[in-house]
């Protein structure tokens, strides 16, 4: 069971890393910083306005 958990966790971490890298590359191509990209993503995800804590 532990081996399955470790393998699943490694796969999950790999996929998260790939997603992060994709957003990083997209940010660079758009000429945005990573934080600016996350702000725009959050606004798009929550609609026209959202709390600063979001």
Image (tube, rainbow, N blue to C red):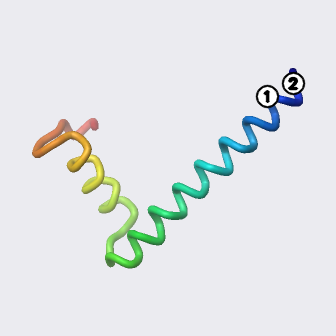
Q: Badge 1 is on which residue?
A: 5
Helix or strand or loop: what does disc 1 sit on? helix
Q: Is residue 2 left or right of residue 15?
A: right
Callout 2: 10 Å neighbours few (<14), some, many (20+)?
few
Q: Badge 2 is on which residue?
A: 2
Callout 1: 10 Å neighbours few (<14), some, many (20+)?
few
Q: Residue sitting at 41 percent across and 70 percent down? A: 26
* Position of residue 49 measured from the top left corner of the image (x, y, whole percent): 12, 42
Q: Residue sitting at 29 percent across and 53 percent down? A: 41
Mark 2 vs mark 1, CA separation in Å: 5 Å
Q: Is residue 54 left or right of residue 22?
A: left
**Residue 29 picture quarter:** bottom left
Q: Is residue 44 above or below residue 53?
A: below
* Position of residue 14 measured from the top left corner of the image (x, y, whole percent): 68, 51
Q: Are marks 2 and 1 in contact (CB under 8 Å)?
A: yes
Q: Residue sitting at 17 percent across and 39 percent down? A: 50
* Position of residue 1 measured from the top left corner of the image (x, y, whole percent): 87, 21
Q: Residue sitting at 33 percent across and 78 percent down? A: 31
Q: Is residue 10 left or right of residue 51?
A: right
* Residue at the extreme top: 1
Q: Is residue 31 left or right of residue 13?
A: left
Helix or strand or loop: what does disc 2 sit on? helix
- Quadrant including the C terminus: top left
Which labelled disc corresponds to residue 17?
none
**Residue 36 picture quarter:** bottom left
């Amino acid at each position: 069971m532990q081996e399955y958990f470790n393998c699943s966790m490694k796969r999950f971490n790999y996929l998260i890393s790939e997603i992060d890298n994709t957003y990083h590359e997209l940010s660079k191509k758009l000429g945005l910083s990573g934080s600016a990209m996350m702000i725009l993503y959050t606004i798009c995800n929550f609609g026209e306005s959202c709390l600063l804590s979001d």
